[in-house]
């Protein structure tokens, strides 16, 4: 077996894992909501990427194309990518407290957002929590999950920090500061 065969096998396994995850997300979304909103088409994904000025991580694009254009996910549901009203594209506003390339995907309420880092190949999910009135905006950013895939798995498995049982547990995880916040905010 060659090195190329090993790489091809790893890619095929990763594609299978992603397809399985998307199927699990769709199933959980349908259990929670019944009928889901329409899916985004390839043209809508391309239009969103043009407007944002960066590509979506492949898993995020597939979610919008294969599950629904928002309206599913933890508690308050993912924003639609595009369309009328509040969308991920409309909510994206790089500014002094919002780094370029972080796409807001969910509003937790009270000014808190979940955002996907579209500049990182792992597509980590970050938590923006400005309510502590930080002296430095970098202090308002936390790593929610090291990847979008792990974040989604925690939702379908019922193990995310937002789950009441997890949140109230004695050993509940504390949010960890996002180590790249200061660097990304200054660029």
Image: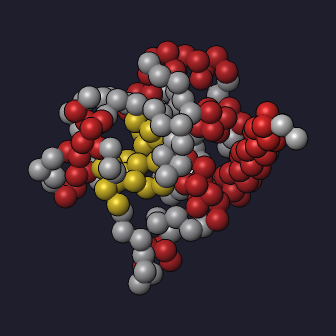
Quadrant into which the C terminus falls: top left
Residue 119, horizontal then vertical, whole percent:
45, 32
Would you say 67 lies left or right of 158 here? right
Residue in view at x 40 percent, y 30 percent? 101
> Relative to 162, is 113 above or below?
above
Residue at position x 63%, y 38% from top?
Answer: 59
Q: Going by the picture, which residue comes out furthest to the front?
A: 2
The quadrant the N terminus occupies is top right
In the depicted structure, whether residue 65 falls above or below residue 161: above
Which of the 4 image quadrants contains residue 97?
top left
Measured along the vertical axis of the image, is residue 109 above or below residue 159? above
Front in this rendered view, residue 71 or 88: 88
Task: Determine the image quadrant of residue 186.
Answer: top left
Residue at 51 percent of width and 21 percent of height:
49
| Residue that lies at the very extreme toward the bottom in this rendered image | 170
Colouring used for the render:
secondary structure
Q: Nearer the viewer, residue 71 or 103?
A: 103
The x, y position of residue 24, in whole percent, is 73, 54
x, y percentage for residue 121?
53, 37
In the displayed structure image, the side of residue 104 where residue 7 appears, left or right:
right
Q: Is residue 141 left or right of residue 186?
A: right
State which quadrant residue 181 falls in. top left
Q: Residue furthest left?
A: 135
Residue 183 in sight: yes
Residue 108: image x %, image y %? 40, 53
């Amino acid at each position: 077996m060659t090195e190329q065969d090993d790489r091809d096998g790893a890619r095929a396994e990763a594609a299978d894992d992603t397809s399985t995850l998307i199927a699990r997300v769709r199933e959980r979304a349908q259990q929670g909501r019944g009928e889901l909103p329409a899916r985004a088409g390839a043209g809508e994904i391309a239009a969103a990427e043009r407007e944002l000025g960066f590509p979506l991580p492949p898993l995020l694009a597939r979610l919008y194309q294969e599950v629904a254009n928002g309206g599913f996910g933890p508690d308050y549901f993912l924003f639609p990518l595009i369309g009328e009203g509040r969308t991920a594209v409309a909510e994206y506003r790089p500014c002094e407290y919002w780094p370029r390339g972080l796409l807001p995907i969910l509003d937790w309420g009270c000014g808190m957002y979940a955002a996907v880092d579209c500049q990182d190949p792992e597509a980590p999910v970050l938590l923006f929590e400005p309510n502590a009135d930080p002296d430095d905006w970098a202090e308002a950013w936390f790593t929610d999950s090291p990847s979008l895939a792990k974040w989604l798995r925690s939702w379908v498995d019922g193990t995310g920090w937002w789950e009441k049982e997890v949140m109230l547990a004695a050993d509940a995880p504390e949010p960890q500061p996002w180590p790249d916040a200061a660097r990304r905010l200054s660029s």
